[in-house]
Image (cartoon, grey):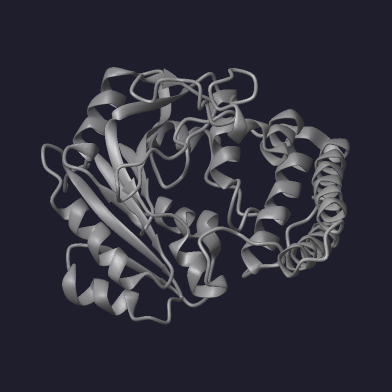
Amino acid sequence: MSVINVPDASVIVVSFNTRELLRESLLTVRDSSGVTFETIVVDNASHDGSADMVTAEFPEVRLIRSNINLGFAAANNRAFEIALGRYVVLLNSDAFLRPGALRLSVEHMDANPLAGLAGARLVGRDGSWQPSARMFPSLLNNLLAMSGLAARYPKSRLLGRMDRTWANPLEPCEVDWVPGAYSIIRRSVLDRIGFFDERFFLYYEEVDLCRRVKATNSQVWYWPDIVVEHLGGESAKSMDDTKVPKPGSRTELWRMRAGLLYFRKHHGSLGAWSNMLIERCWYCLRAIRNSWSNSAERSARVADLKSGLATLKQAWGDTRGGKVSPSRPW
């Protein structure tokens, strides 16, 4: 009878047209020490040779090639099905492990049996802080973010609550959710709550998963001594040529669809409708404000805002108010 050696962690990377960054990310995983691990890459039908690069340069990696873009949730689920580790680690293809990150992740989870899922301190190339420990989306939190009050008063416990910008980023804490750019999940908890909800193609899937983790009385933690460098939005650039979703862009449509699905699932039809109304009012008020000037810059801004309104209307129709998810790929 053969004995299967169970690795401490299964590191899962979903790839979509980020070949050069994927290579860099996998090299940081390969250099990890002090912990046993396997690496699984799920390639979402990249057309830049990402999958072939993995086969040629990383023979130790278990590669899953998808014929279509499954999105983030469904692609990770394919890897969950074959992962052998005691822990599952999610790593974006544009995220890079700093030395000791994987070892510390496993050590912290082993030392904290109530922790079902945890995240790292995300930093940019220049070491700048990125939101890494967050509160669940709500009508109030979304309103504070869209109004600009959260950005204007980051040290306020009320106004800066969404991203906990008031808190010391070097202090570990239990939180609502952590970004999916890097997270470690206890396999036994994942088996108990189920995999990602595949209705989410991109955006909100990790928020939904963290809600389900906490619903089992497991904890979600932020550990700042685990440091991961993260660029962000690189896969989206291959479609919209931008890191940040813009009004009318495909990725902005995906964000709006996912937001409606999330609010419908966790806050009911009234929650989805209210969230849509808040965002619609934000677009309308900004369009009215910018229409007071005839400058070319203001006119272009009004056009962008009107495009955002049209995208929001499309997202509402596509999801029937957050009730259904469009077929993949979005």
Write the residue at 30% across / 64% down.
22
Write the residue at 53% across / 54% down.
73
Is residue 22 depicted above or below 261 in this figure? below
The reply, left or right, for residue 45 in relation to residue 229 is: right
- Can residue 4 be seen in this snapshot? no
Q: Quadrant of the C terminus?
A: bottom right
Q: Nearer the viewer, residue 299 or 266?
A: 299
The reply, left or right, for residue 322 in relation to residue 176 is: right
- Can residue 22 be seen in this snapshot? yes
The reply, left or right, for residue 298 in relation to residue 254 is: right
Q: Nearer the viewer, residue 203 or 128?
A: 128
The reply, left or right, for residue 207 in relation to residue 168 is: right
Is residue 62 depicted above or below 192 in this figure? below
Rendering coords of residue 124 (x, y %): 35, 47
Rendering coords of residue 92 (x, y %): 38, 54
Rendering coords of residue 37 (x, y %): 21, 46
Write the residue at 17% across / 37% down.
100
- Residue 101 image-quadrant placement: top left
Rendering coords of residue 146 (x, y %): 71, 41
Write the residue at 26% across / 58% down.
25
